[in-house]
Image (cartoon, rainbow, N blue to C red):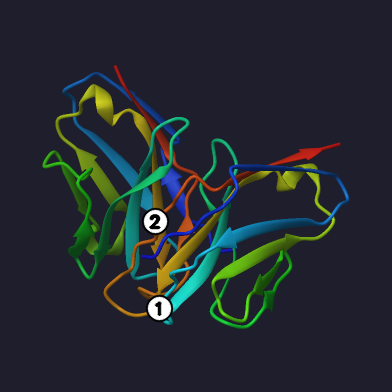
Amino acid sequence: DAKTTQPDSMESTEGETVHLPCSHATISGNEYIYWYRQVPLQGPEYVTHGLQQNTTNSMAFLAIASDRKSSTLILPHVSLRDAAVYHCILRVANYGNEKITFGAGTKLTIKP
Amino acid sequence: GPKVLQIPSHQIIDMGQMVTLNCDPVSNHLYFYWYKQILGQQMEFLVNFYNGKVMEKSKLFKDQFSVERPDGSYFTLKIQPTALEDSAVYFCASSLYSQNTLYFGAGTRLSVL
């Protein structure tokens, strides 16, 4: 799987909208962009994923650049519960490459 | 979202003993995974499993490790014998198809003394 680059840490305040960037300059055409988050002592939680179009769900909005070389996970009106390590992961969208590979991610800290 | 259950949440054993970690995956899922995370470090892929077979394993999946899912019951990770460096949190995950979303359990913390 191609490599992603994320900032080590970010900080925000409750109620703000957070933009978490991810760079994936060598992404292949058949790779999805996945986002997971993990809080201490818990397993990774699926947030969202996309291929080319922007996507939205109850947790977040994923904005994908038109050239797909970068993406941004947007978390509206964050609360203390959104504090976690956020992982941006590329995953090949075909059979034979099932696993996902985690990096260090971005540690998001939320202040009251 | 879909739930993956891991039993027990914490296991303490003496070095050299055998341990079995149990995972109850999402009911209709077909692909199963184990990951290892040492405190403060990144999640590391161990193995994935489909149709009764190991599909891929990493260098961390030592000869002392084995996985199975007998008769569609728990998906298990067995370590025999255990070593001090096996102390970590082990996460199980499952997905419906190989390219679908992985859902993770809360992990089993293994402490080898």
Residue A1 lies left or right of residue B62; in this view the side is: right
Find residue B39 and report its image quarter. Answer: top left
What is the chain identity of the residue bearing mark 2?
A
Residue bearing the label numbered 1: A93
Find residue A22 and report its image quarter. Answer: bottom right
Label 1 neighbourhood size at 10 Å, few (<14), some (14-19), many (20+)?
some
Find residue B30 and report its image quarter. Answer: bottom left
Cβ–Cβ under 8 Å for marks 1 and 2? no
Residue bearing the label numbered 2: A101
Amino acid carrying label 2: it is: Thr
Which type of secondary structure does the marked residue at label 1 adopt? loop
> In the picture shown, does residue A74 fall above or below B66?
below
Amino acid carrying label 1: it is: Ala
Please report the residue visible at 67 percent of the width from the left and 63 percent of the height from the top. A73
Residue A52 lies left or right of residue A81; in this view the side is: left
- Give x and y (percent) for residue A44: 52, 51
